[in-house]
Image (cartoon, rainbow, N blue to C red):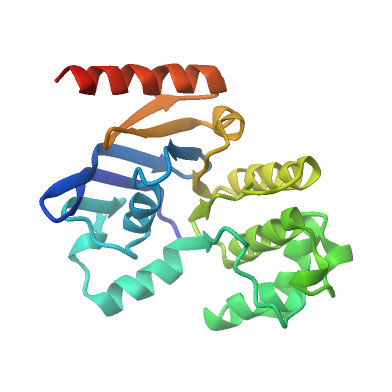
Amino acid sequence: MHEANRLRLADVEIRYGRRPVVVAPALEIARSSTTALVGASGSGKSSLLRCLTGLQRPSSGRVFVDDLDLTSLSPSRLARRRRELFGIVLQDGGLVPSLSALDNVQVALDLRRIPRSRSTARSTLADLGLTRLADRRPDELSGGERQRVAFARVLAQRAPFATLDEPTSSLDAESRADVVDGIRALAAAGCGTVLVTHDLELAAGVDAVAAITEGQVVTHPGPTTASDIRRRMRAVHDLQSER
């Protein structure tokens, strides 16, 4: 696994036109920690997630991995660093439909020229209790199983950081439990994880919650409760409304 230890934002603003949509004075994600990014639809959660991985440059401010300023890199160097540093899990898992679960994990390793890709893919699935799913294609998996295979792909890549976009969206209770297990496995493996979610019960159980309210990113320590997250977000909203 790459030796990076800390991902952080410094005075980041995301603007569309002249209007700031997201203002994040400071946000830090350490290895082995999980941070939930919450906020209303359209609040800028996905834009902030893209900034963290270098898929979108902030309008101002800096994104650092340890002392490396991602915002200063050329597009080619940034793309190379992104492959080394981040495992990115899309809302549907982002698996290749025509490939088995095992092949989906292996192909990610092959693209990164990681040796012994087949055996590594197989052992990673086994570590997550997914051996029985190895030969199944994505359309033969539940939503939670697809997400866990995507998590296995991140773990096999040995990426120090992972971003998850709405990992429990539209999942039933059993599939949601699979995703929660996968998130815990990422943390146990030393992966610093940022997840975008509307699921405040999920957010309440992680190490920190970064809430976007009225464009402001305010971080609260966890674990907490869903009602406490709502209360804190209302307090920020009321404060902004008074200004």
- Where is 135 relative to 13, above or below? below
Residue at 80 percent of width and 64 percent of height: 141
Q: Position of residue 92 (x, y in %)?
A: 62, 61
Where residue 173 sits, quadrant-wise, is top right
Q: Quadrant of the C terminus?
A: top left
- Give the residue at x 41% y 48%: 5
The single residue placed furthest to the left in the displayed view is 18
- Establish if 177 lies above or below 61: above
Measured as percent of width and height from the top left, residue 136 is found at 83, 73
Counting every numbered tag in the picture gives 0
Res. 140 in view: yes
> Residue 234 vs residue 202: left or right?
left
Side of 96 where 177 appears, left or right? right
Whether residue 224 is visible, yes or no, is: no
Nearest to the observer: residue 104 or residue 1 = 104
Give the percent coordinates (x, y) of residue 97: 69, 78
As rendered, which of 19 and 189 lies closer to the eye? 19
Viewer-nearest residue: 69 or 91: 91
Q: Picture quarter containing residue 156?
A: bottom right
Check the image and name the residue furthest to the right. Answer: 132
**Residue at 60%, 50% in the rendered image:** 167
Query: Residue 133: x percent and y percent?
Result: 84, 66
The residue located at (67%, 47%) in the rendering is 185
17 vs 69, left or right, is left
